[in-house]
Amino acid sequence: MKQAIGIDIGGTGIKGARVDLATGALLSDRIKIPTPAGAHPADVFNVVETIVNRLTPTGGESIGVCFPAVVTHGRTRSASNVSNDWIDFPANEELTKALGQPIQMVNDADAAGVAEARLGAANGVAGLVILTTLGTGIGSAFLMDGVLVPNSELGLLEMEGQWAERSASNSAKERENLSFEAWSQRLTKFYRHVEDLFSPELFVIGGGISASHEEFFPLVDARTPLIPARFLNNAGIIGSALLAGEQI
Ligand code: BGC
């Protein structure tokens, strides 16, 4: 069975598991450790190392890591919910050094998009699918006929003078104690803006809150169909492992 390790670094938690690359099934417990305060690279790397060691790597398998920032040429370029030390930081190279084995780092929503396009809710959908993750921020992935166009940042669209993710993410809902009705009005504004710009065929919605999709999808008044991600909060782990597994 082809397998790889997937690690999802987030602003609040760092999660990892061993993944079956054919089905996306987790082959180990999902290990979750809180993100160290400040989320500085060296502290985050220590946690990643702990998780990798607990997953008892055989030595030869690939390790994919996703991160909540733009990642180009192995460098993290932004830092909305983590330490500013990550801006323009050679994360791929430094984490490879820290672990003593190669890793592949990608944006977290892009990893989730790949998992959903290959094995989940967006599988086989032709045309443009836009996946958004509603979590601490809003992440996005563009998938054209299943092929990822990396590093879109729809959470950074401006809505009423601020980044959309500041008012429409799940953390905004929690911070402001919004009802599903009130939050859905903000989501409607966000998704309408996105569909006006890109005319996608489908929105796939990820992040843990999409487990409650029945409570809010019917309240979001967009033209484009919304469907929940299949892998919910594990999509980042699974997509990272899939992308890393392809590098062998
Ligand atoms: C970041 C994105 C990330 C998203 C979800 C945003 O704040 O800018 O790169 O994908 O959060 O974690």
Image (cartoon, rainbow, N blue to C red):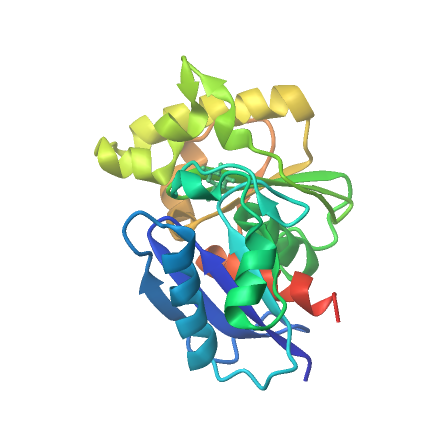
Q: Residue at x 48, y 25 (%)?
A: 190
Q: Position of residue 161 (x, y in %)?
A: 41, 13
Q: Position of residue 109 (x, y in %)?
A: 55, 47
- Relative placement, left or right, of 218 versus 6 is left
- The residue at the point 50 percent across, 66 percent down is 98
**Residue 151 on image: x %, y %:** 63, 39
| 215 is higher (above) or lower (below) than 96 | above
| Image-based side of 76 in relation to 14, left or right | right
Q: Is residue 213 left or right of residue 225?
A: left
Total numbered labels placed on residues in the image? 0
Q: Nearer the viewer, residue 194 or 33?
A: 33
Q: Quadrant of residue 230?
A: bottom right
Position above or below: 48 against 151: below
**Which quarter of the rendered picture does the C terminus lie within?**
bottom right
Question: In front here: 88 or 178?
Answer: 88
> 60 or 133: which is nearer to us?
60
Which quadrant does the N terminus fall into? Answer: bottom right
Can residue 41 be seen at all in this image of the molecule? yes
Residue at position x 52%, y 42% in the image: 69
Image position of 203 (left or right of 144):
left
Residue that lies at the very extreme toward the left in this rendered image: 177
Q: Visible in this render: residue 30? A: no
Query: How far from the left and from the top, in percent, is residue 15?
Result: 42, 64
Q: Residue at x 42, y 80 (%)?
A: 54
Residue 118 in the image: above or below residue 163: below
